[in-house]
Image (tube, rainbow, N blue to C red):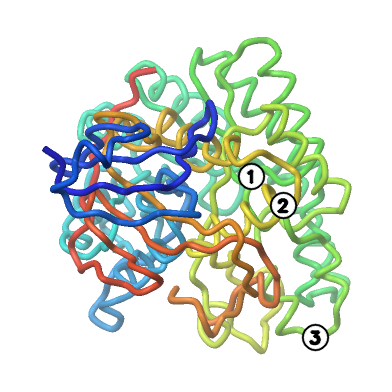
């Protein structure tokens, strides 16, 4: 017997879209099909007439801030923002910028335990951890088997910044992750090139915000992407390229995929929507909003990324959500660009931007969008009960109005940042209601969930 029936909507899967009812029991999908609601007449119903019924989005790349004594509600508030945007599961990193302690940043296992303790009972939606492997940790490679066994099978390594891994340690991390059933996520930029360009710009006195982008060229990203793939191949391990931003880096991924190598890549909504024209302005407060790494690229790159999403060169769209604030982390008026915090918020606008720019804009089908935002993230990141509207999966559902129009405004968002890079963007489509394991979190545009309703998810990548 069903606990709830979502009746009369259009269910969207990777294989197609069709009118169907969805019956839910015990937090999982019991049945999907035409007439299901008629057979479950005694169950409570949600009327989804005229709406798309989507699986909840899975955002696998966020830097959601941990709660602290000074700001106890930040993790919870961003989880609520995720729910408003149709995201029912997110993965967060525990690098120092997210608020992990010094002790937690020195050890993968200590960092995992601290993350779990500090987020217990905090989230409105389900969530998990992707650890950060740092060049400043004593011996992170030896901790990887225990980390993976504890339900954290993904970790991120950087090829830039002062905590980057050398190629030797990156190779060791890839090999260890591959041998123990994990997958390494890699931030690919060439540190030698970028450090030299930054030093030259500072020496010239070119320290305004816009020079951040000018010192991180696309070829530096492409070369590092090629090198990360080569190291992964030598290590006989999968590799996942995070926040890919340009055509040249995409070409490296596509070439590896054509050879059948286990190489995966994500891009982000900001690379699909915004371009480096943002850096041409003279108003510092506007330019600083787009100080991200890698930076925004050209209109040509933007078009190539949409092509990559259609053709399969790109596997996932994730936000790289960084809830910076202009008055605090971004420190506006801005310091010299090397000191500016990198990142921008996006946890609440993922579905809106990808549907509005992608599906309504004619770039991708709604079925492909579901694959990019839910089904593939669930498969790659060990979330077997998430990502699809199928019998036995968690009843994480989004009721989405494809005919609505809205303008994205910071004043109407719920994230803990004080700006959105999409201010003024007009989009088609709007989230109406959201269910997490069959329980309403958003109902008719209002938050009806609770703090702690979201569970920490221990994950396992089965290949």
| Residue named by callout 3 | 283
| Among the two numbered marks 2 and 3 on one chain, the one whose residue lies closer to the N terminus | 2
Q: Quadrant of residue 424?
A: bottom right
Where residue 141 appears, as percent x and y from the top left, is 36, 31
Q: Do the CB atoms of the residues marked 3 and 1 lie less than 8 Å apart?
A: no
Q: CA distance from mark 2 to mark 1?
A: 8 Å
Up-down: is 69 above or below 459?
Answer: below
Q: Residues within 10 Å of mark 3 (few under 14, many from 20)?
A: few
Observer able to see residue 226:
yes
Q: Secondary structure at mark 2?
A: helix
Q: Residues within 10 Å of mark 2 (few under 14, many from 20)?
A: many
For image coordinates 75% across by 74% down, the residue present is 209
Q: Viewer-nearest of labels 2 and 3?
A: 2
Q: CA distance from mark 3 to mark 1?
A: 27 Å
Up-down: is 95 above or below 316?
Answer: below
Q: Do the CB atoms of the residues marked 2 and 3 lie less than 8 Å apart?
A: no
For image coordinates 34% across by 25% down, the residue present is 461
| Residue named by callout 2 | 272
Where residue 358 appears, as percent x and y from the top left, is 69, 49
For image coordinates 60% across by 41% down, the residue present is 366
In depth, the one of 160 and 199 nearer the eye is 160
| Among the two numbered marks 2 and 1 on one chain, the one whose residue lies closer to the N terminus | 1
Q: Secondary structure at mark 3?
A: loop
| Among the two numbered marks 3 and 1 on one chain, the one whose residue lies closer to the N terminus | 1
Which quadrant: the N terminus? top left
Q: CA distance from mark 2 to mark 3?
A: 23 Å
Q: Quadrant of residue 213?
A: bottom right
Q: Viewer-nearest of labels 2 and 1?
A: 2
Observer able to see residue 93:
no
Where residue 305 appears, as percent x and y from the top left, is 75, 41
Q: Do the CB atoms of the residues marked 2 and 1 lie less than 8 Å apart?
A: yes
| Residue named by callout 1 | 267
């Amino acid at each position: 017997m069903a606990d709830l029936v979502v009746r009369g909507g259009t269910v969207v899967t990777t294989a197609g879209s069709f009118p169907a009812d969805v019956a839910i029991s015990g937090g999982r999908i019991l049945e999907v099909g035409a007439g299901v609601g008629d057979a479950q007449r005694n169950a409570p119903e949600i009327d989804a007439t005229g709406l798309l019924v989507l699986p909840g989005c899975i955002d696998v790349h966020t830097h959601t801030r941990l709660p602290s004594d000074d700001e106890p509600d930040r993790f919870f508030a961003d989880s609520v923002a995720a729910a408003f945007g149709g995201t029912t599961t997110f993965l967060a990193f525990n690098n120092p910028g997210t608020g992990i302690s010094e002790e937690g940043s020195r050890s993968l296992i200590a960092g995992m335990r601290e993350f779990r303790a500090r987020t217990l009972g905090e989230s409105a939606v389900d969530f998990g951890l992707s650890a950060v492997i740092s060049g400043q940790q004593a011996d992170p490679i030896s901790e990887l088997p225990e980390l993976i066994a504890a339900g954290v099978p993904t970790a991120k390594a950087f090829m830039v910044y002062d905590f980057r891994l050398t190629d030797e340690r990156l190779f060791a991390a890839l090999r260890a992750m591959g041998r123990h059933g994990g997958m390494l996520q890699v931030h690919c930029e060439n540190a030698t090139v970028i450090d030299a360009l930054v030093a030259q710009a500072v020496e010239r006195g070119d320290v305004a915000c816009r020079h951040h982008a000018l010192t991180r060229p696309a070829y530096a990203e492409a070369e590092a992407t090629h090198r990360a793939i080569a190291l992964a191949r030598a290590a006989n391990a999968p590799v996942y390229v995070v926040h890919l931003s340009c055509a040249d880096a995409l070409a490296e991924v596509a070439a590896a995929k054509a050879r059948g190598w286990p190489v995966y890549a994500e891009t982000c909504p900001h690379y699909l929507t915004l371009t480096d024209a943002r850096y041409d302005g003279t108003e510092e407060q506007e330019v600083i909003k787009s100080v991200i790494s890698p930076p925004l690229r050209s209109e040509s790159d933007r078009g190539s990324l949409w092509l990559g999403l259609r053709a399969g060169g790109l596997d996932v769209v994730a936000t790289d959500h960084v809830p910076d604030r202009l008055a605090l982390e971004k420190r506006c008026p801005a310091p010299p660009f090397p000191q500016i915090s990198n990142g921008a918020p996006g946890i609440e606008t993922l579905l809106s931007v990808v549907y509005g720019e992608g599906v309504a804009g004619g770039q991708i089908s709604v079925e492909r969008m579901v694959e990019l935002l839910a089904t593939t993230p669930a498969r790659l990141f060990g979330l077997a009960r998430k990502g699809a509207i199928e019998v036995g999966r968690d009843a994480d559902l989004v009721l989405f109005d494809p005919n609505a129009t809205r303008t994205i405004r910071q004043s109407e968002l719920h994230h803990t940042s004080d700006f959105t890079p999409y201010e003024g963007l007009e989009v088609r489509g709007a989230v109406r209601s959201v269910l997490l394991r069959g329980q309403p979190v958003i109902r008719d545009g209002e938050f009806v969930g609770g703090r702690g309703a979201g569970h920490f998810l221990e994950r396992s990548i089965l290949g």
